[in-house]
Amino acid sequence: MKFKFSEIPKYLINLFLIFWIGFSLFMFFWLILSSFKTTREIYMGVWTMPSNISLDNYIRVLTDFGLLRFMVNSLFVVTISTVLVLVLSAPIAYVLSRLKFFGSSFISLGFIIGIGIPIQTIFIPLYLMMSGMSLTDSYLGLIWLYTVTSLPFTIYLLMGFFKTIPSTLEDAARIDGATATQSFLKIMLPMARSGLISAGIFVFVMLWKEFLLALVFISTENYKTISLGLYSLITKLTYTGDWGGLFAGVVLVILPSIIFYSILARKFIAGLTVGIGKG
Amino acid sequence: MDYRSSIFKKRYKNFILISTIPVVTFYVIFMILPIVQSLYYSLFKWSGFTSYKQYIGLKNYIDLTGDSLFLQSVLNSFKYVIFGSIIIIAITLMFTYVISNYKSKKLKDLVQMILFVPNTISPVALALLWGFILNTRWGLLNGVLDKIGLDFLQRGWLGNDYIFGAALSLLVWIHVGFFIVMYIAAADRIPTSLYESAKLDGASSWKQFTKITIPLIKDVIETSLVLWTIFSFKIFGYLYVFGAGGAGADAPPPVRNISVQLFLTAFGKRTPINRLAYASAMAIILLILVAILVYVIRNLLMSAETIEY
């Protein structure tokens, strides 16, 4: 490519972008390398290499400190919540995006406003409500909360998606006398499959990294999710000065997310930008 | 199609009722009603754990105006809004400029995906990672500065002087990746014919970006500003964990936004405060501030006319 004076901003910004990504990758590489170091080696500075590659840090964190248990908890709670959110959101999103009935635009608006409600403004009443029903420190309580707080955004996302599906097939089915249930199950759901998968992946990832609700509603080791579990490791491991273990813990939390994301990134981004593409 | 015509109405009625009523009820009970309850609790003197509540009217709100920790957290929230939005939107726009000019679709997707990665990771892990990087004694940043001979730039990044900037840098690193996806998606929908005619007129790529791309993705830039404003007030995990600096202590005041201060007041473990009613008043202020800011920004920026192309 020929050098053009007017294109200087482009070269400079590209350089900055390369630096940005390079730094991110380098950081990640350093994190993994450090997770094999002993705490003594970490103290000796950034450029010290681990003396021997052993999985001690990892094994200690996974078993003695229960990170494995936290991961299983998260997998259980998040999977069930994601399925529930989709099952509850898809029909209402379909109805709100396709049919006009008394109150439909009011309900849509209600959900859109719900996206902006900070959890912090409702977690105190929720806490009192849930502890009144003995649902704090339980899988059920967390699933419940994850489901309800994910509803507004998922419904919004799916409404956008349903709107992009042409209505000709549906109209034909209606004229042939199909009920709403039939056209939803037999026509819309199959056509919306990719949208549902994108939304599902999105909800799963968001709930997998959720921290605040878990922090408020879970205090027993048995029910801790991955984010909360890692948080509780901070206190335990820094009191004993076990930084190596903490590095390993961070890697163990980050790595599965990155792997999951890199496999499904395209779907994920599609879910996120479904409303923007329409113009 | 008019779904209100009587033939269809009957056939659709049950489906509409079954799909909406339970979800809407569930949503109202667990997300809307609690806002009203928060408002109600905020009028009492109450720890939350006794049955006795004393009605004190607006006293909690009056006390908040003299609570220096709370006021600092409000100020910090605004600092995150202002500095964060300027830095994040500037960087995101610059990246949009170069990435949207990539010829290869694969490269374009790859770069976006890499930038987005932090958004998929637990805030606890990222906050810890950032703490490792900025650790004064053995952190990556000071280590690199030392190696490349810039050791005079080494700082105690997690000390009170720098910790706000350190926390902000974490948020910037994460959210540029979030907004870039939105910006690129918006830039991609602009018809190429516009750029082609600009190219014929001899406009540089920078000129094309500022004269065509930015005006045409203005709506998304404005949306990102609104979103960032909401984030600045409600972001919790990154700040709560990052500030703790690894010792399991509470996040220090310079990094706290309203959310963190609110949590510590209601459920803080280190100093068990457990003032649920007082914290509810903070929650109401948080909600009002977010609502006002979003309203103001939308009205200031959103032009009634949308650009057609």
Image (tube, coloured by chain):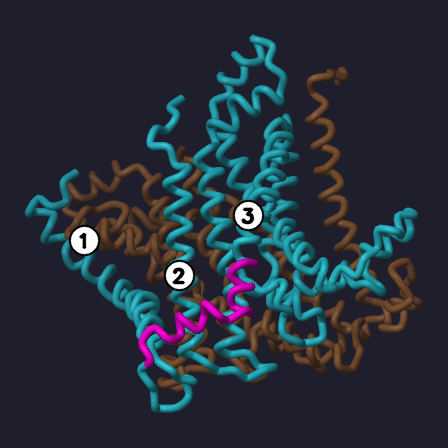
Chain colours: A brown, B cyan
Please tell me the numbered disc located at residue B287.
2
Majority secondary structure of magenta residues: helix
Q: Which numbered disc, 3 or 2, marks the residue that appears first in the sequence?
A: 3
Residue visible at 89% across and 52% down in the picture:
B151
Q: In the image, are marks 3 and 1 on the same chain? A: no
Chain letter for the residue marked with disc 1 in the picture: A
Residue at image point 35% right, 80% down:
B44
- Tag 2: Cα neighbours inside 10 Å, few (<14), some, or many (≥20)? many
Q: Which chain carries label 2?
A: B
Q: Quadrant of the image for the C terminus of chain B?
A: top left
The amino acid beneath tag 3 is Ile
Tell me the crowding category of disc 1: few under 14, some 14 to 19, or many 20 or more residues within 10 angstroms, Cα based.
few
Q: Distance between the residues labelled 3 and 2?
A: 18 Å
Nearer to me, A18 or B290: B290
Residue A134 visible in the shown view: yes
The chain that hosts pointer 3 is B
Q: Name the residue tied to disc 1.
A: A103
Q: Name the residue under label 3.
A: B82
Residue type pointed to by label 1: Gly
Q: Identify which residue, A235 or A190, lies in the foreground.
A: A235
- Does residue B296 appear to the left or right of A173 in the view shown? right
Is residue A208 among what the camera can see?
no
Which span is picked out in magenta? Answer: B56-76
Of the two numbered discs 2 and 1 in the rendering, the one whose residue sits closer to the viewer = 2
